[in-house]
Amino acid sequence: MRRPAGEKDPSPGSPRWRAVAAVVAGALPALCFPAPGLWWLAYVVLVPWLALPATARTPRRAALEGWLGGTGFMLAVHHWLLPSLHVFLLVLAALLGALWAPWGVLVRDLLRGRPGPARCAAALLLVPCGWLLIELVRSWEYLGGPWGVLGASQWQVAPALRLASLGGVWLLTLLLVAVNTALTALLLSPTARRTALGGLLAVAVAAGAAWAWAPRPEPAGTARIAVVQAGVVAGPDARFARGEQLTRTLAGRGVDLVVWGESSVGADLTQRPDLRARLAALSREVDADLLVNVDARRAGRPGIYKSSVLIGPDGPTGDRYDKMRLVPFGEYVPARSLLGWATSVGKAATEDRHRGTRQVVMTAGTSPGLRFGPLVCFETAFPDMSRRLVRDGAGLLVAQSSTSSFQESWAPEQHASLAALRAAETWRPMVHATLTGVSAVYGPDGAPVGGQLGTDRATAAVYALPLAHGTSPYVRFGDWPLYAALLALAAYCLRTGVRALRPPSARQPGDRNTELPAEPVTRTLRFLRRPRPAPR
């Protein structure tokens, strides 16, 4: 596409430096999450990345810069996997980064040049919707799950947690990207400043009103929950013995439930009567049920399962939950016949674990009023799983996890922070109990209860956990921000297609460059409408 005479090149800088800048700009949002925890940066961190495709010379260049930025983001957010996956992490980051290529084109279409008020307003709506669609696609468990969702960076901000109870973490993502889009428009286009400022004001007013008028959970007493964090111990027998020793210190402390971390038991309890007897004795000694996690082959069924098993004074109560969503490459290799080579370059699973088929709500036998829903490790990243447990009657969410392979990385703290969001979304307190830290507990509003147990501790801690009644708007209405985003993008695509198919004589003067252009779509539709020569 030729530029009018006298117009400056809209893509300053050489292509090589712009490519490097895209990777770096895409990596910056990782700083918003724990461990750096620069949550305030999330409100401006996308501006450099947005500015690149917005000033790209061609749609192809915008797509490339979206892709490179997405690759940088995926690498930065998952960098702690590098010791395990090695070069395969680069492959995965490049594949997932491609999800941002269409988003880069969308950014260019809506923010390039001097957008008018309508195009700027559309950008404030559609650019966040496009980002949210990417988060939806990559949240599919087989693509890695919703790790690094932008809204999750606000896990320690009380007003943001209140908003999460309305629309989940997805609503927080929409607001953050809208703010970044408005700031980008302010910097790039003087003609859009009034609309961008109006958009910022609208976001602030809407968020403030929602925070002020959002319903709140009703208090429903307390429960005393103990977390047993064994620490780094070599071997399943030694790990079991450490958990046993720490649990004995809870005797006489009036706990309602004792939670061990993921993989705290390394043998099938149906085949180990000695372990069953030791766990039952512990339950009697502390006068509370124990929730342990068995990581072992199960008798009568092929393969390895990770299972939350409830133990009472007489042994296993029969309540059992088998982990449903497994960690790609960590617990199974997707399409192993094609990607099995990953096991030769990293620490990918040499054998696929098996999945459970349904979620389970358990009742503590020693505290009959306490109903809780277990999740295992990776599953705390999925808002729909905690929402389903609460709809099924869970008054408490319990996660059993282990990040022992990543002790010195950002992973333990980032993983623990997800529990605050799940608690705020559902109005149910959540216990995040790990084998080796970080363990943490959050109340029904997402606020921390007690102190965290870091990766340097092996201990048993008791938390007086506030319970709550009521159904949060997110539990009631579900992922409505996702549906709204899909509807907005569908309407935009439909409108663009209709306008592109209209004959030139029927178009308005503003159709060409000032309002809602979509150059790649328009070119494609014009090509399809072009008359073909008759065959000779």
Image (spheres, rainbow, N blue to C red):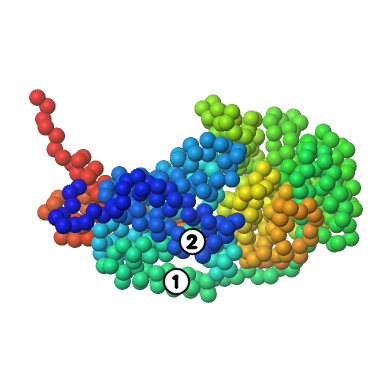
Residue 3 at x, y percent in the picture: 18, 52
Q: CA distance from mark 2 to mark 1?
A: 15 Å
Identify the residue under disc 1: 204
Nearer the observer, 214 or 86: 86
How would you rate the neighbour count of disc 2 (Cα within 10 Å): few for under 14, some for 14-19, many for 20 or more?
A: many
Residue 12 at x, y percent in the picture: 29, 53
Residue 192 at x, y percent in the picture: 29, 67
Q: Amino acid at mark 2?
A: Ala
Which residue: 20% across, 40% down? 527
Residue 11 visible, this orientation: yes
Residue 124 visible, this orientation: no
How would you rate the neighbour count of disc 1 (Cα within 10 Å): few for under 14, some for 14-19, many for 20 or more?
A: some
Q: Find residue 485 and report its image quarter.
A: bottom left
Nearer the observer, 25 or 50: 25
Which residue: 76% across, 54% down? 457
Identify the residue under disc 2: 42
What secondary structure is marked by label 1? helix
Q: Amino acid at mark 1?
A: Ala
- Decide if residue 251 is on the left or right side of residue 152: right
What secondary structure is marked by label 2? helix
- Decide if residue 496 is on the left or right side of residue 48: left
Residue 58 at x, y percent in the picture: 27, 47
Q: Earlier in the sequence, mark 2 or mark 1?
A: 2
Please say if the residues under marks 2 and 1 sit with CB atoms less than 8 Å apart. no
Which residue: 22% across, 45% down? 523
